[in-house]
Image: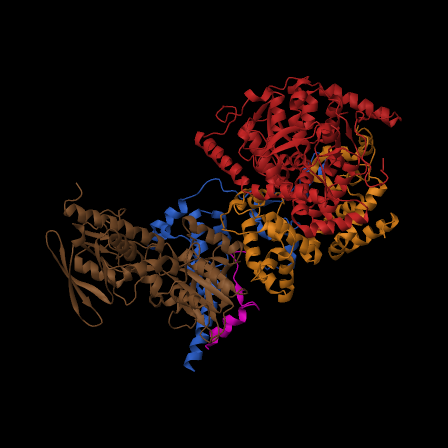
Chain colours: A red, B blue, C brown, D orange
Amino acid sequence: MMDKEILIDFKKEEISITKEDQKLFQKLVEERRAKLAKGTIEDYLKMLEKMKELEKKGEIIIHHVNEEYQPRLVKTLSGRIKKIPTVELWQHKSCGQCGHIPGYISALYWIMNELNIPYVDDTNQTSCTAWNYYGSGTSNTLAITAVFLRNMHVAYEKNAYPLIHCGTSFGDYKECRFFVVMNDEIRNKVRAILKKIDRDIVIPEELVHYSEWLHVMRNEIAERKKYDVSNIKVAVHAACHTYKLMSEDYTYDDNILNGIRPAPTSSIVLALGAKLVDYSTWYDCCGFGFRHILTEREISRSFAYFRKIRPIVQETQADVLITHDTGCVTTLDKSQVVPLAHGYKETIPVISDSQFAALAMGAHPFKICQLHWHIADWRNLLNKMGIDWQSAYDDYKKYIEDIKKGAKPFLLIPPPRKLQPRVIKGKSIVS
Amino acid sequence: MTENKEEKKERKGQYIIEREYIEDERIIEPEKLDLGGVDASGRWGLIILPRVITDFDHSLVEEVKKLPRGKHIENCWQCGLCTAVCPIAHKEPRFNPRYFIYIVKMGYKSEINKLKGLFIFAKAVVYVLKHVLSMLTQLVL
Amino acid sequence: MLNDKAILVIGAGPAGLQASQDIAEFGIKVVLVEKNNELGGAPIRWKYHTLAPDFVPTEKVLGPLINYAKNSNLITVYTNSIVESYERKDDHFNVRILNLKNKSIHYEKVNAVIVATGFEHFNAAVDPRYGYGVNPNVIGINELEIMISNGKILRHDGKIPKRIGFILCVGSRDKATNQWCCTVCCGVSIKQAIEIKKLIPDSQIYIIYMDIRTIGLWEKLYWESMEEHHINYIRGRVGEIYWTGEKLLVKGEDTLVRGPFEALFDMIVLAVGMEPGEGTKQVAKVFGLNLNQYGFLSPRIPNIHYDSGKDGIFLAGACVAPMSVEEAISEGSAAALQAIKYVMQKSKKVP
Amino acid sequence: MLMNAKFYLSRLNEEGWYYGGLPGLQWEAEQARKQKIDFLRKIVNELYNDDRFHEFFYACINCGNCTAVCPAFRFVDFEPRIVVQKVMHAKDEPELIYQMMDQYIWACYQCYSCWDVCPAHNNPGGLVLILKEIAVRYGLDSAKKALEPYSKIVYKITTTGTQITPDMHTTIALFRDWGPHKAELAKNIRIDRKAVPVPSLNSVMDKSWKVDEQTMRELMIIHKEAGVWDSIRNTLKDVADMIEETAKEKGVK
């Protein structure tokens, strides 16, 4: 395995945390914190047991990660082995990514097409509506759980395993699943609502975030690498909702960051051969604040800049900041403009792990990776990677002119599927 | 913080919902800010400085320890008894003796500056005197 | 041989009783002198209902010790008595025991002495803030223990209290009274709070504390009290308790959440700490043992409690330092072993 | 009973408490004092009877782990520990909860770092969320003030199931702090969206991606049945009307 030898050795000089003892202390704190999160393991494993019982009693259907999805095994923080499906995926899109920074999802689809992974890009899908839940408090447990189970039921009908793009959707679906399994009252109320749109409770055996898919496929991606990224210093920001919301169920790997920090995103950076750098405010949120990024941006940009961008650039001089969630990219990328105008100097391009992987595999920086939606300056990153972004940009401009004149835009068509949709209780399947 | 209406309008960062919990001096609201042709003055260019303390400042504590009655400041473990019995604190809670010792020991200069100019001491002393006098009159009559 | 030997145990609390039983089971006679009328020390005198942390009934722990002391023919018990003086011979002591009730004098020949005179609760009246003894419904945790044993928590007017406040560290950790921490009043108060919540389910119970020191396995009391019994905790101090004629107006400060507060309570329980009892001072004078700055008996080396520094005299229990019942019992055994070893060495049995 | 007892007693609220408030935060206590006691008790009961409450609150020993990792604490005097403490004591002192409802809970980023590190498994972020939901359901001024600029998002989510839609980015007006590049993007967003190579996203402006009519209908039925429309009506009345109008057009009774 590529990344087995390349271990994060906290002592190495390029990780420029100054004092030796500070590093040791930080390592100990994190080891303890990793164990601390284990404290919630019992309830989590109890929930998984009860889920199986409910299936036996016929109360719920479990969407198993069976052989057809060619699962790969990963270890989670709770030590439990988790099955990550790799093919026949039902793309659970994220509203922030699609509406705002489409490079995320176009890069991911391009990678899947390159690796010939069949998937479903469904229009019968809603977002997890967490903007009403966490963002504003206008929603409640019933509503968000019903939305969750509606989407899962659609995936089950199409016999494709849901792959969740957004960190928050992944987080709140874990929370909803916990309550729908453990709290009978919520389950019955949600079932009543689902009956009104003649659907039933289908709970996925594993909730999978797209960064975990990139994690298990990192070696196939690394093999198709076209550009040498070994001189690129990469700082990674893990999205809070993926590994802090119901912290037991996210991928950890003892060979990556000593198994103390989540493995996804860092693992693909290591697999591609780039240099992973560490910084002191690793554990901090990106400043998204859910409601703040839209209606109180004073708070979001101050936090993102002073607690994330500035420490990263000062401590590590990294070339790029990579994360795996909508809110983080939006906040970290857009929050640099005003502080720079105030006279601060630090800036760093912010892209997603799927975009970085696609760039390294030689995808078109604009037609596929859609970098033009990102504001922080990514030009010297591409120069350092050896990608001639100027000609790519002219090429994109020409492509835009053709479309204006009526040319049909190029679309990423998913490879053909092998699995047939399921017929459930005589209900006609919406194709 | 009861303030009159006009002053509230121009108050810096008034659109922030949790405004009462941010000190004024940490809010930078530019009169004019131009972002390459886009006007981001006022609220659009507002940034807030972090309140993270990077180092403890012992100068204040050393200063107090030199004072004749200040030698015991090191013994305080913030039990709160001084404020519990303080009649002024119970009338004017901004006057909190335990809190004064706390910010001196921690060296929070920003908190101490907040107390300057607040005539809470005078207001509170007036209250206590009024209160004590009224009790005395009741006893005497 | 050993059966003509005897060991004097002063104080029939948990430590003294455990020492007496160990010595007697070893076949050596015991002379047990107790100042009060009944055996069992503070837990029995204040009718402790259960012991922290697992709510084990006091009866279950001390009952067997007391019955053994009463029924064992090797233990001669002197209640309402004190050791008035002693005479040191080369291998034994002649001890003069005075019965305080009928003023009778008894002489005993013993080969070793174990001092286990225990502690007294701090008298909260010494600290005027709380108005203990003046304000009705301000009681100590010792008096509350009696109420819990009787199963009825009543105010002075016979009504059931709704809002009860525990004030910790009364008389403790205070240069004006006792400077030390009594190590148990946190755990005991929380235990009592849980017991009250069981007796009065809709009561509102507040524990006003500086630090919660539920040491070792007692910590689960602290967490369970919040998780299952909804006991409230205020970090701060109480400055004054004022009787408004029908309720107690408690003035204090919550250093973490509420700032200065005043609240009406139906009943206030003062977690009175431990201080060296009268018995300890009297025995120290009689045997010439030295006391530390706090009035506790001070062993030769502070960390080794049983070694009093005087030949043949051993210390055990709360007379050396504030401690819980479980520690006092184990110190009783420790002192007993040392005394037995000492006696056997004197009679050349052990090399 | 001397005169001063009457003075002190007059200051206590119906629960028999007077709060001075920590230095500088007296206005919280003043706000809460103005509320009627049974309204406060109703809020606290709703908090304690929420289905998630017993998963989110166990015990709190004031260790401060949550505040140590809280992002909001680095810029605003907001502490998740205080939230848990006030929730813990709210059963016997309902006024404590209202002290937070005005501004305090709106400072939370809902990032759940606190849930990750709490040694007692508490979830301060979750408790804040329940309080936000209650604030919206009761239409408190703080909820109105916080969500007024947020109303377009609430409408988009409840009717199309998606949000941050390209049609909200056609002008720089709402995003001036994102600078000139954003102004550039806003100008030719329509054509750029035609160049997005993802089938379900290509050329879509009013939604994040093409959403089937039937999907939107099902979503609206879910929100209606789960009571989301009712809580929106209490805070953003006009948005609630718009939602119901759109729902009628789409055939949701």
Q: Is residue D45 left or right of residue C224?
A: right
What residue is drawn where x is 62% and y is 40%?
A287
Quadrant assignment for the N terminus of chain A: top right
Q: Quadrant of residue A164?
A: top right
Viewer-nearest residue: C77 or B29? C77
Can residue C111 be seen at all in this image of the molecule? no
Image spot of residue C281 (x, y percent): 23, 61
What residue is drawn where x is 60% and y is 49%?
D55
Q: Is residue A13 left or right of residue A246?
A: left
Q: Is residue B55 left or right of residue A59?
A: left
Viewer-nearest residue: D175 or C104? C104
Q: Is residue B141 above or below residue D231?
A: below
Magenta part of the chain: D1-25
Q: For the view shown, which residue lies furthest in the bottom direction?
A: B141
Image spot of residue B133 (x, y percent): 44, 74
Can residue D76 be seen at all in this image of the molecule? yes
Q: Quadrant of residue A358?
A: top right
Q: Does residue C121 show up magenta in the picture?
A: no
Q: Is residue C335 left or right of residue B6?
A: left
Viewer-nearest residue: A46 or A123? A46
Q: For the view shown, which residue lies furthest in the right direction?
A: A406
Viewer-nearest residue: A73 or A387? A73
Image spot of residue D107 (x, y percent): 62, 48
Quadrant assignment for the C terminus of chain A: top right
Q: Does residue D21 show up magenta in the picture?
A: yes
